[in-house]
Amino acid sequence: MTIFKYAYNILLQMDTFVKDPVTSGNKNVIVTENKNDMISIIFNEFSKIVQDSQSLVTVGLSGGSMVGIMSDVISRLDQSLKDKLRLFCVDERLVSLDDEDSNTGAYLKVLGNEFKKQFVIVEEINDGTFFVRIR
């Protein structure tokens, strides 16, 4: 049996995280035995950051396999912490939210449409141009 080791790099860069800012030279790499342990560690770190913040916390999310991981982390937060989040996909594709290639759409499918207000959403206008909606 192969043991899968999950490694991730906590690079939470946000303007409200001023106590211990993350810089390119200050990286925290943690290796876990399984995905659930990884999610628990990310959740603990992430929830502390959001809880300690006195204002909105802006978080850039990656798509792909990270959707399942970060959706799990976000869904575990108390409602008061969820309400402090502003989320955006750093690698969003310029497609409608219901397109299978939309990373924001993938997050909303897992988290539910009630999270739509937390996302910075890139939308297509009929003439082929795009706009960003910030709530």
Image (spheres, rainbow, N blue to C red):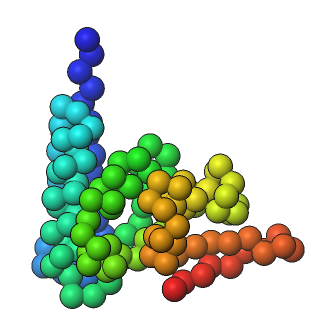
Is 108 placed above or below 115 here? above
Q: Position of residue 69 (x, y in %)?
A: 35, 48
83 sits to left or right of 123: left
Q: Position of residue 123 (x, y in %)?
A: 68, 72
Query: From this viewpoint, which residue is outermost toward the top?
Result: 1
Is 77 placed above or below 53 here? above
Q: Nearer the viewer, residue 27 or 130?
A: 130
Q: Position of residue 82 (x, y in %)?
A: 32, 73
Dividing the picture into quadrants, the one containing residue 7 is top left
Asked whether residue 22 is in view, the answer is no
Task: Identify the residue at horizontal 33%, vertical 61% (top origin).
Answer: 74
Q: Position of residue 95 (x, y in %)?
A: 70, 61
Query: From this viewpoint, which residue is outermost toward the left?
Result: 19
Q: Nearer the viewer, residue 122 or 22?
A: 122
Is 127 placed above or below 6 here? below
Task: Identify the residue at horizontal 37%, vertical 70% (top origin).
Answer: 59
Count the marks: how many? 0
Is 106 placed above or below 2 here? below
Asked whether residue 135 is in view, the answer is yes
Dividing the picture into quadrants, the one containing residue 134 is bottom right
Task: Identify the residue at horizontal 31%, vertical 80% (top origin).
Answer: 84
Query: From this viewpoint, which residue is outermost toward the right?
Result: 127
Q: Nearer the viewer, residue 76 or 103?
A: 76
Task: Identify the residue at horizontal 23%, vertical 40% (top origin).
Answer: 36
Q: Nearer the viewer, residue 94 or 73?
A: 73
Q: Which quarter of the rendering shows the N terminus?
A: top left
